[in-house]
Image: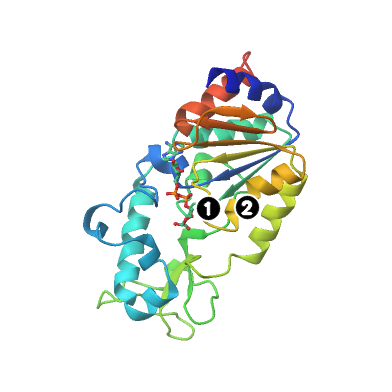
Amino acid sequence: ANLVLDQLAPLLRGAKRLVVLTGAGISAESGLATFRDAMTGLWANFRAEELATPEAFEQNPKLVWDWYVWRRKLAQAAKPNGAHFALVELERLVPQLTIVTQNVDGLHQRAGSAGVIELHGSLSRFKCSTDNEPVDAKDFGDSPDGMPPRCPRCHAFVRPDIVWFGEMLPPSALQTAFQVTKKCDLFFSIGTSGVVEPAASLPRRAIEYGASVMINNLDVDTASEPPLYSLQGKAGTILPELLRRAWPRL
Ligand code: APR
């Protein structure tokens, strides 16, 4: 990893427009399980693909609502880790840094990152399951029968403002993600297995538009085939180390 880190350090130091795509792996060291890890606890016999769908919510609104109550509690109890904080530090050091995240845990914002593009929504936001208009959490209490709360406007169930499998991503977020990817000179993909589209196509787009790309997760082999670099290892170790090499005086 040292050789690749030493090759990436000058690219990072000289970067003008950096885009960082993040996935569940950047929050793993905060204790939040990734999707591809088995679901834990009482959700062990479920798969995200079965619960995070409009059909599941239609068939069993209480089960899906309870799953998100559980995930929201875990996310609220979790703390940003060294990888999140390294990106906050990078925001100060690179002229333009844009974080595009698939995560819904809000840890980038909690660490202090600004302008985070949330491709898949957020556990802290809710909307009406009929018209998709935002519903403020203070406008609905816990429902007595454990069912999802009701929309104060039309009385339909409230649902998480999260993109479910088979649903469209928020158009403005997706458009901005493609625009910044087109213009960046350096693109990092951190902690994502790169299997869910359209996020998965961003690194390839970055290469097509002439950027250098670094992919960090636990599955890749550390290698450098410019303009593509891959670093196997924990983001909480890799990102702070990369910053130290790029700005040794700090
Ligand atoms: N540091 C870096 N990478 C890590 C770490 C870590 N400490 N721990 C795990 N990883 C990597 C794994 O190697 C894997 O490549 O994080 C990745 C996690 O992949 P997934 O679980 O597939 O998560 P993600 O890529 O974010 O999933 C994308 O799929 O389930 C849907 O909408 C959901 O946003 C999610 C999307």
Above or below: residue 175 compared with residue 133: above
> Could you tell me residue 160's position as x and y percent?
44, 67
First of labels 2, 1 by sequence position: 1
The image's colouring method is rainbow
The label shown at residue 28 is none
Residue depicted at x 48% and y 50%: 106
Say whether marks 2 and 1 touch (CB < 8 Å).
Answer: no
Q: Quadrant of residue 229?
A: top right
Three-letter code, disc 1: Gln
> Could you tell me residue 119's position as x and y percent?
57, 57
Residue density around tag 1, few if under 14, some if 14–19, many if 20 or more, within 10 Å: many
Q: Quadrant of residue 2?
A: top right
Instruction: Name the residue tied to disc 2.
Output: 201
Residue depicted at x 52% and y 44%: 108
> Of helix, strand and loop, which one carries label 2?
helix
The one of 7 and 116 positioned closer to us in this rendering: 7
Instruction: Name the residue tied to disc 1.
Output: 102
Asked if the residue at label 1 sits under 8 Å from ligand 1, the reply is: yes
Callout in the foreground (2, 1): 2
- Seen as rendered, the residue at the extreme top is 249
Give the side of residue 5 with respect to residue 17, left or right.
left
> Could you tell me residue 94's position as x and y percent?
70, 32
The one of 243 and 40 positioned closer to us in this rendering: 40
Cα–Cα gap, marks 2 and 1 = 13 Å
> Could you tell me residue 174's position as x and y percent?
65, 59
Name the quadrant of the C terminus.
top right
Three-letter code, disc 2: Ser
> Of helix, strand and loop, which one carries label 1?
loop
Above or below: residue 75 compared with residue 237: below
